[in-house]
């Protein structure tokens, strides 16, 4: 295949034992080109979980082909389900999908919010408003629930903290576990909506009508989950007279609960720091874990 696989994707595939997927990628791309009547072009260099490239449909519609690394979980099914429910509102429109092959064909959007040049307060408004466009009831759709994600996060935090040799304080771990238990207990099916699960400036791309999200995890949870993710990288400082000011602002703009936003941010900040530490993404891992320590001492 003339289209080179990005190094991050190659490394992640090898680490996951997916060398066969790598070897079969040229044939897979060619088969999808024939079967879906598309032309695959330039490969995107960002990301590590999928092979992503520009594509053009028969009618010259601009699209993006995404081929997910093979996994044992329902990652592909959940992303495809979330995109189908969104139906192009708040998220990129899905043109075609093949769960078995982990293949998605979605609309091609513009540059990410991170490259917009907008000031930080305006970028926060965009993230918040784009999330609100996505949220909608989706009962019985088969997506994981907030409590299921919460329990997974709790298990991941404990196991990763031990495996990594305690890279942050036990106080930070205990506080995050207390927060996630409260969020699990507070779950209400009647309030649950489709949430993205990983909203940040690089997953928020310019569209004709503003911005849209890409790469949804796909959950049925309280809307506050997405807002907590948005502010998980806030570097809250001990002694800050208004440590919850960002959560308070988001609550005021959306009508959501400030405490729930704050608690999801606590959990996501620590779990993301541990993910980064596992992959040796520095200095981000150190910064997130240090912030988790500070938050636990407020």
Image: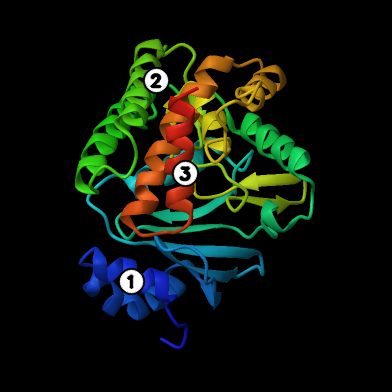
- For the residues marked 3 and 2, what is the alpha-carbon distance in whole angstroms? 17 Å
- For residue 137, say whether it is visible: no
Foreground residue among 67 and 97: 67
User: Which numbered disc covers residue 179?
Assistant: 2
Count neighbours of disc 1 (C-alpha within 10 A) and say few if under 14, some if 14 to 19, many if 20 or more: some
- Earlier in the chain: of badge 2 and badge 1, it is 1
* Residue 40 higher or lower than 273, as above or below: below
> Residue 118 versus residue 195: which sits nearer the camera?
118
Residue found farthest to the front: 239
* Labels 3 and 2 touching (C-beta < 8 A): no
Closer to the observer: label 3 or label 1? Answer: 3
Q: What residue sits 71% from the left and 52% below the top? A: 206
Q: State the separation of the CA atoms marked 2 and 1.
A: 34 Å
Q: Secondary structure at mark 3?
A: helix
Q: Secondary structure at mark 2?
A: helix
Residue 250 rendering spot, x and y as whole percentages: 66, 24
Of circles 2 and 1, which is in front?
2
Q: Quadrant of residue 186?
A: top left
CB contact under 8 Å: marks 3 and 1? no
Q: Which residue is mark 1?
A: 11
Quick one: quadrant of the N terminus?
A: bottom left
Q: Which residue is mark 3?
A: 288
Figure quadrant of residue 247: top right
Q: Position of residue 74 (x, y in %)?
A: 30, 44
Decide: is 66 above or below 121: below
Relative to the observer, which residue lies in front, 296 or 34?
296
Q: Residue visible at 50% across and 71% down?
A: 37
> Secondary structure beneath disc 1?
helix
| Label 2 crowd bin: few (<14), some (14–19), many (20+), radius 10 Å | many
């Amino acid at each position: 295949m003339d289209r080179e696989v990005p190094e991050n994707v190659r490394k992640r595939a090898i680490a996951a034992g997916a060398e066969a997927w790598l070897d079969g990628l040229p044939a897979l791309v060619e088969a999808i080109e024939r079967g879906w009547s598309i032309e695959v072009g330039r490969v995107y260099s960002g990301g590590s979980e999928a092979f992503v490239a520009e594509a053009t449909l028969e009618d010259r519609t601009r699209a993006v082909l995404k081929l997910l690394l093979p996994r044992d979980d329902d990652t592909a099914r959940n992303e495809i389900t979330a995109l189908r429910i969104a139906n192009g509102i708040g998220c990129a429109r899905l043109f075609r999908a093949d769960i078995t092959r982990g293949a998605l064909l979605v609309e091609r959007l513009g540059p990410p919010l991170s490259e917009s040049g907008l000031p930080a307060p305006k970028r926060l408004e965009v993230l918040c408003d784009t999330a609100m466009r996505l949220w909608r009831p989706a009962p019985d759709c088969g997506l994981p629930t907030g409590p299921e994600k919460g329990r997974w996060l709790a298990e991941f935090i404990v196991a990763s903290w031990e495996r990594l040799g305690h890279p942050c304080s036990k106080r930070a771990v205990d506080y995050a576990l207390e927060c996630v238990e409260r969020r699990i207990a507070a779950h209400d099916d009647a309030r649950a909506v489709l949430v993205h699960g990983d909203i940040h400036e690089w997953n928020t791309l310019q569209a004709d009508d503003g911005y849209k999200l890409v790469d949804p995890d796909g959950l049925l949870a309280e809307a506050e989950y997405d807002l907590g993710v948005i502010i998980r990288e806030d570097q809250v400082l001990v002694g800050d007279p208004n440590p919850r000011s960002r959560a308070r602002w988001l609550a005021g703009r959306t009508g959501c609960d400030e405490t729930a936003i704050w608690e999801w941010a606590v959990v996501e900040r620590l779990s993301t720091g541990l993910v980064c530490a596992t992959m040796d993404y520095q200095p981000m891992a150190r910064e997130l874990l240090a912030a988790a320590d500070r938050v636990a001492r407020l």
